[in-house]
Image: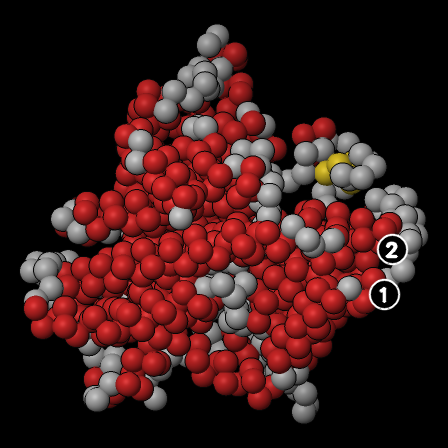
Amino acid sequence: MDGILLGLETALQPSNILICLLGVTLGTAVGVLPGIGPTATVALLLPITFEFDAVASLIMLAGIYYGAQYGGSTTAILLNLPGESSSVVTALDGHQMARQGRAGPALATAALGSFFAGTVGTIVLAAFAPPLAQLALKFGPADYFAVVVLGLIASIALASGSTVKALAMIVLGLLLGTIGQDQFTGVPRFTFGVRELYEGLDFVSLAVGLFGLAEIIRNLESRHSASIVTRKVEGLWLKKDDFRRITKPVLRGTALGSVLGVLPGGGHVLASFTSYSVEKNLSKDPKKFGTGVIEGVAAPESANNAAAQTSFIPLLSLGLPAHPVMALLVGAFIIQGITPGPNVINDEPELVWGLIASMWVGNLLLVMLNLPLIGIWVKMLAVPYEVMFPAIIAFASIGCYSLNLNAWDVFAIAGAGVVGYFLIRWGCEAAPLLLGFVLGPLLEENLRRAMIISRGDPTVFATRPISASLLALAAVIIVIAVLPSVRRKREVVFQGEDD
Amino acid sequence: MSTESGVAHGAGHRPAPFRPDLYAGAAFIVLGLAFAIAGSRYDVGSALRMGSGYVPLALGALLAVLGLLVVAMAFRGGDPAIRDVQREPVPWRRGGLLVGAVMFFGFFVSGLGLAPTLFVTTFIAALAGHGTSPLKAALTSAGITALCLVVFVALLRLRLPLLGEWLGG
């Protein structure tokens, strides 16, 4: 718990609170834009954070993340437009509540449930990340290779859509990650003599292009005609009866989310879906779910947030991002000159604990400020998209360019945007590609080191117990994901719960 | 783009291949082969001492194989996740304007400086909007440029020259 105190001390410095507040506000403002989910929001705002030093920039990022999540819940509830798969469930009952004029309580439930779950998740994180990091220090290159493979494979098992395509996107991401100087020999690979590419493709540009630009092009396919429920966002506060009704769903959602969030690859999605099913099954009146019951908002929002917090465990102890936003955080760490992994907790305690604590502070600021400001966010929804997207283009271009004053970073946004648009159109999700890109260098480095240590003997991956069991687990996950019967069940889960 | 129209029923017993899968698979095969071939020109080395080309060659080959699987999926009815989704036509003009706007920024920001580049970039981007007239686009971009200059230059103190060397800045 010393760590948490250190973290709070860092996060509660006035300048850091201010930066966190700025992040929360920006994150919410961009996150409420229809069609821009939390991942795209964080990607688009990432460049701005690099104007600050390491601790401050990660704190701002934490604020943006929470703001974006809350913004995503807001669009899910008010517009029935979930920004990412984990808030799909929130939209089921949340939007119905909004249509009945209970948008206020729905948003308040989302914020309060998230805050409680985030608090518990933070404690879980503080308790489990350091011992796991200690364990990870004993890992050899072969074990690390296996961990990365497992993380990549797990990320597709929980994604919706085709397994083969997701695998292909991971491999494509790994390949894009090899562009630039070879870390072992210094040979420039796939750079076509362009000096600016020696450092590799810029991660931020790739993320902004894949998630931001591609998404905007997709939104321009058709005229925007979302039915905004702006009339009655009054009566924000929960009634006594509401409090009674949400207590248990919040507790159960938090517990489920804390456990499932540790799973690499999308535990937060699984958590929100599972907790919704659990509440529905436990309810005396399951038929009412989907018609605007407050439990249907409280449980998935808590589960989602608890999971968001505990998904930091694999990131901070192993350096493994569990979902795309975590991959963006890894990118941010690396740009600040920090390699995420088991050493970070010991080497940079102020940074790590500051980040964890400011996740919590960000959540608190959200509850204190955004609930009263909900009227303003609703007005943001009324800003026409025709004005919004040129502004987003401008922010993204300036942000990416200002990092290195390198025009190639801007060209990379355009390239990634075009590629991303078509791949998404053809049913290939961008998230696995980004995970592959971030983890590619780690995978190659550990593969090559493991083979040198084992003198070219590939059985090293099967004879070391840790790597053998992790790789076996990865194989099992692939088999399960490909098996038709399991696929069908999975589709049922993803196609909503209204049976 | 009407050619992308889902599982069209061709002549004979076999339905036509599902085009999005065909395109995706072909893209993976081409990219995989490109990385594999380009990778094999570097020092590939051996399993013991992997050279710079080893991992790209192996992954490129793997990507090509996965691409073949996706193509095979196209002939077996297509990816169920997107098969029945109604796809809008590709917004070539709007998308082109957006990409053009970003490219313009990259090409001209150092020469022209932030203020003029930003204005033109947002103007091109704004033209991509549904029913945005040039006048409205100009107003929009003027507003956004002013906002960005306040946020990035005045508040965040970004070290980007407002006017570039071509304009004597």
Q: SS of the residue at dot 1? A: loop
Q: Is residue A454 left or right of residue A65?
A: right
Lateral position of residue B111 relative to residue A113, left or right: right
Q: Residue under circle 1?
A: A459
Q: Which label is found at residue B156? A: none
Residue at position x 45%, y 28% in the image: A53
Residue closest to the eye, A6 or A404 = A6
Residue A235 appears at what percent x and percent y? 7, 60
Q: Is residue B114 left or right of residue B58?
A: left
Q: Is residue B2 above or below residue B42?
A: below
| Residue for badge 2 | A454
Image colouring: secondary structure
Q: Position of residue A292 (x, y in %)?
A: 20, 75
Badge 1, how many Cα within 10 Å: few under 14, some, many 20+? few
Dot placed on the residue nearer the N-terminal end, 2 or 1: 2
| Chain of the residue under label 2 | A
Q: Nearer the viewer, residue A117 or A157?
A: A117
